[in-house]
Amino acid sequence: MSDFWETSVSYLKGVGPARAALLNKELHIFTYADLIHYYPFRHEDRSRIENIAHLKKNWAGDDEMPPVQLKGRLLQGRIVGEGNKQRLVALFTDGSGDMELLWFQGIQWVHKNLKWGETYLIYGKAQLFQERLSMVHPDAEWFDPANPPVLGLQPVYSLTETLKKKFLNTKALSKIQKELLKIAEPHITETLPPYLLEKNHLTSKKEALKHIHLPQSHEMLEQAKRRLKFEELFFIQLQLLKLKQFKKSYHQGYVCKETALVKNFYNHHLPFELTNAQKKVLREVYADMCNGRQMNRLLQGDVGSGKTMVAFVAMLFAVGNGLQACMMAPTEILAEQHFKGLQPYAEKLGITIDLLTGSTKNLARRVMLGRLENGNLKILIGTHALIEEVVQFERLGLCVIDEQHRFGVEQRSKLWKKTADIFPHVLVMTATPIPRTLAMTLYGDLDVSVLDELPAGRKPIRTAHRTESQRLKVYQFIRDEITAGRQAYIVYPLIEESEKLDYKNLMDGAASVKQAFPDLNISVVHGKISAAEKDYEMQRFKRRETEIMVATTVIEVGVDVPNASVMLIENAEKFGLAQLHQLRGRVGRGAEQSYCILMTGLKVSKEGRIRIETMVRTTNGFEIADVDLNLRGPGNLMGKEQSGLMNLLIADLAQDSGLLQLARQYATDIIEKDPNLLLPQHKVLQIQLNHKNKENQWSRIS
């Protein structure tokens, strides 16, 4: 990258030190390179000027009318109302008719700075009420006949309130971008090989940057967006594939061979026939663990698809080859559940297994760590406690990480350092289905396995939407299920900003449930009770000492009760799709038919309705994940720990899946034909990769 692009924005005409400091702090824009890559998030079409009479005549209804641009005189405005009901009202006329303009914020400043009686271009969404047109907070620009504004597509940038208050609005930023483009043109170099541009009909980098900030037509804007999105997604895929190649080439893994231990388990102790999906995934895992390279595999499987059994067989494969294995879970409840589920099998096979969590007593911990270090302890299940420095293995060969999206990359990397010479094989698992586009970007350096089949005998959960008016029928249905020997969950939402309100809602709910079912035993579980109390209540429920569990989302990942057949989710519209799907997965774990009831009020937002309808329509986690991606976007879907690759400047994984797959295909072809990018036509790619964000030390971690 030339020195030009490293120049501070403070040197740009129209910026200066004060504005530069604001751009640094508010938008993290420090250099010319940062500025030119700060793209508009949308463009407004200001190429046409409407007139008021035409607008009234063709009125199609409030929600359907797009924003419009009008040119006319701004007549004297007046401030009306008192206190917080004050507003500025002005009359605007264009000769064909007139309309009212209204401002509710910054009214004194607006009143003082508008040129009353002068001609203005105004832009905004018009409203029609009782045959009178109005526009709230229009964008108003004084029309200077000597220097008329250029009509056309105008960029809109994402800005903070602080910037707007300091008059660094979208127009000001657009003007600054224009100044930069004037001097930047000779310094913009092509970043993609000519054959890629030609094959995909992509415009040049120079044209793309020019028309994303200052588009001359809709066509040029679309070409610019397509080019910049493709480039962004292509280089992410290229980086991920290079990383994958690096791991396969340089990271040695323990070489495993077929072992009698696994055969013994299959022949004498396996409680059920593995599904075809489980067998396929295990073949992939075996192949990885036998080829001499470190396994880095992501196992995606819906709730109840049998991931834990796959992980256990993989651990047996490691132990049978003289290695140790560990499994890290995000919560004590989940770690203990894995331990209790696997302990009987391990003991039958004569394999030592133990549990390490924050609650493990010091004496037991010391003994356990000693056995781990001398190799007598073969399988260790635990929480974050596993990554503490005092936890040392003799020969750790396999790390299984459950619900991996709950661990940051740095946390996971600490498991790598538990062996001196060779990296352990890594199997990361998630019950949160990840849309294919997101998996390709977030885990593009991992091999991905999918469990898309439920074990035999499991029946799909039936899901229904009910409103408050149907509560008595819902309660009667729960009573019928309990009379038939089943159990039920009733879950209330958790809104982190308001713990007191959460607690009140839950306790009010629990009181109502006790009133409705006075003859039944009820467990109440929430975040304010200790881990020991929580566990006590969950174990009571598991032992059928209580028939109903009233809880917040603490049960989303955790307790496994095959006898529970009903999941009633209160205020279901307040939950995200992933949470609803996880909660539903708490039932349907036995052979009996299970049910999920989504209870909402009568008024549900458009997004809330889509979530509810999706849950009722399908139990397919991947279909649900795709809807969630479209509703929430990738950043929100994955959480803070995974946000590194999600800082996309222009591409949108929900909308640009076709472009992502195209970028992935080209990146794959290039790495297969020219893995070190040594061909002359790929020199530009090597240069660009070297310029990409300096590789973070954690980027080599699965």
Image (cartoon, helix red, strand yellow):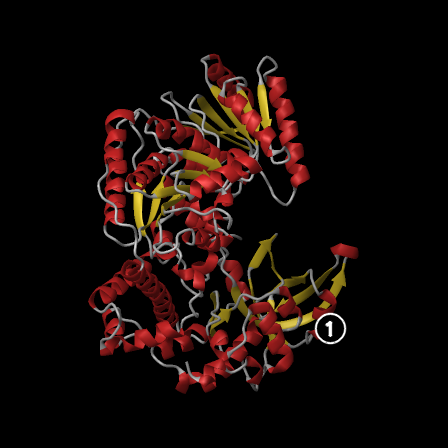
Q: Nearer the viewer, residue 591 or 690?
A: 690
Residue type pointed to by label 1? Lys
Left or right: residue 675 compared with residue 386: left
Give the left or right position of residue 489, taking residue 325 as reference.
right
The residue lying furthest to the left in this view is 673
Q: Is residue 203 placed above or below 624 in the rendered structure?
A: below
Percent coordinates x, y for residue 254 in the rendering: 29, 50
Residue corresponding to mark 1: 112
Q: Position of residue 170 (x, y in %)?
A: 56, 71
Residue drawn at point x = 57 percent, y = 25 percent:
537
Q: Is residue 675 visible?
A: yes
Rendering coords of residue 157 (x, y %)? 52, 68
Q: Nearer the viewer, residue 428 or 500?
A: 428
Quadrant of the image containing the C terminus: bottom left
- Residue that appears at 48% across and 33% down: 336
Quarter of image, res 472: top right
Q: What is the quadrant of the N terminus in the image? A: bottom left
User: How packed is label 1: few (under 14 Cα within 10 Å), some, or many (20 or more)?
Assistant: few
Please tell me in which quadrant of the rendered image residue 521 appears.
top right
User: Nearest the camera: 531 or 568?
Assistant: 531
Residue drawn at x 23%, y 79% as measured from the top left: 680
Foreground of the two, 314 or 106: 314
